[in-house]
Amino acid sequence: MTQSMRITIVAVLGLLVLVTGLLVFMRTDPKSITVQQALSTPDKYYGSKVAITGTPSQVTPSVSGYGVFRLDDATGSIYVVTKLSGPREGAKVSVVGRLNTGVRADLPVAGSVALGTYLVEEKRFVVE
């Protein structure tokens, strides 16, 4: 192996280590917030991945692949739009998703609903 090949291999390995480190550093975990924070400062979290922990209520059946439920915590309630199966009412869950605003929907099950600020669920965890 020539000297230039060794230098190239070391440079490529160094670059791989650097890129891997940057990707790990840039990985964004969702920010845990309360319902009140989401509702009082929606512009701050709009489009951001957040996690809100609370108790589901008013769970509607899925219509055209989407369901809606309210997530209640000690600070308030927020609607959650989901493609996942509906959560069990009364269970404590942490919902991870992106905050959005300004939708009015006519749902066959729930009637006309103005969602205002709502969370689009990406995943959910049951909290013990």
Image (tube, helix red, strand yellow):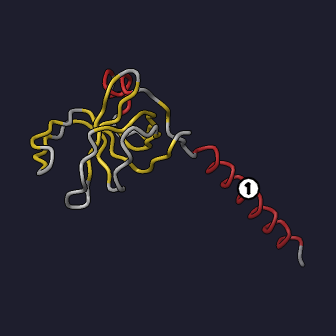
Quarter of the rendering containing residue 20: bottom right
Q: Quadrant of the N terminus?
A: bottom right
Q: Is residue 92 left or right of residue 7?
A: left
Query: Tag 1: Cα neighbours inside 10 Å, few (<14), some, or many (≥20)?
Result: few
Of 42 and 92, nearer the camera is 92
Q: Secondary structure at mark 1?
A: helix
Quarter of the rendering containing residue 117: top left
Q: Is residue 109 above or below residue 74?
A: below
Q: Is residue 85 above or below residue 101?
A: below
Q: Is residue 10 above or below residue 78?
A: below
The x, y position of residue 76, in whole percent, is: 33, 24
Q: Quadrant of the C terminus?
A: top right
Q: Is residue 98 left or right of residue 64?
A: right
Q: Residue at x 15, y 36 (%)?
A: 114
Q: Residue at x 20, y 57 (%)?
A: 63
Quarter of the rendering containing residue 91: top left
Of 37 and 59, nearer the camera is 59
The x, y position of residue 87, in whole percent, is: 38, 48
- Label 1: which residue? 17
Q: Is residue 22 left or right of residue 6?
A: left
The x, y position of residue 5, in whole percent, is: 82, 73
Q: Is residue 37 above or below residue 70?
A: above
